[in-house]
Image: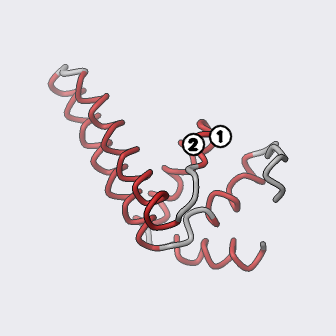
């Protein structure tokens, strides 16, 4: 994909997103950060402490961006496609939880 081209659909975005998360260490950091963020959200809902939502976002994105900068050595897709990246983070999280993400990575890498 040419860096100057804009992706126009989620169907087109997903393989790009997966290729940008090709290393297991980056995906693991995403999973840890997203899980911690989810825990913060749930605790916030039960306690009414809204600052935990902000903490969850900071933890989630902190882990994810660390994976991009130090493992993948690429720029997070969040900067250019924030909504699709957020949706994809949770799709990747669920595929990791069910053990299907490695196959998804193989598929995306071979279709490139």
Which residue is tagged 2?
A: 78
Question: Which mark is drawn over residue 81?
Answer: 1
The reply to whether dot 2 and dot 1 touch (C-beta < 8 Å) is: yes
Residue at image coords 19%, 34%: 43
Q: Position of residue 37 (x, y in %)?
A: 31, 42
Locate residue 32, reporting x and y percent: 32, 57
From the viewer's perspective, tell me whether residue 9 is left or right of residue 54: right
User: What is the quadrant of the C terminus in the image?
Assistant: bottom right
The answer to whether 10 appears left or right of 52 in the picture is right
- Secondary structure at badge 1 equals loop
The colour scheme applied to this rendered structure is secondary structure
Q: Secondary structure at mark 2?
A: helix
Q: Could you tell me how far apart the alpha carbons at marks 2 and 1 are, in whole angstroms? A: 5 Å
Name which residue lies at 68% across and 56% down.
Answer: 14
Q: Position of residue 99 (x, y in %)?
A: 45, 73
Residue located 32% across and 42% down the image: 38
Q: Residues within 10 Å of mark 2 (few under 14, many from 20)?
A: some
- Point out the image quarter for the N terminus: bottom right
In the rendered view, tell whether residue 97 sits above or below residue 53: below
Q: Is residue 100 above or below residue 41?
A: below
Does 9 appear above or below 71?
A: above
Determine the residue positioned at 38% across, 65% down.
28
Q: Is residue 25 above or below residue 45?
A: below
């Amino acid at each position: 994909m040419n860096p100057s081209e804009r992706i126009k659909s989620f169907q087109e975005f997903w393989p790009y997103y997966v290729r940008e998360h090709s290393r297991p260490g980056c995906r693991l950091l995403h999973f840890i950060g997203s899980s911690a963020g989810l825990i913060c959200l749930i605790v916030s809902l039960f306690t009414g402490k809204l600052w935990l939502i902000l903490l969850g976002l900071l933890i989630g994105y902190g882990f994810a961006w660390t994976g991009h900068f130090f493992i993948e050595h690429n720029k997070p897709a969040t900067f250019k496609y924030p909504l699709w990246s957020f949706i994809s983070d949770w799709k990747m999280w669920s595929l990791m939880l069910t053990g299907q993400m490695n196959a998804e990575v193989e598929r995306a890498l071979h279709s490139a």
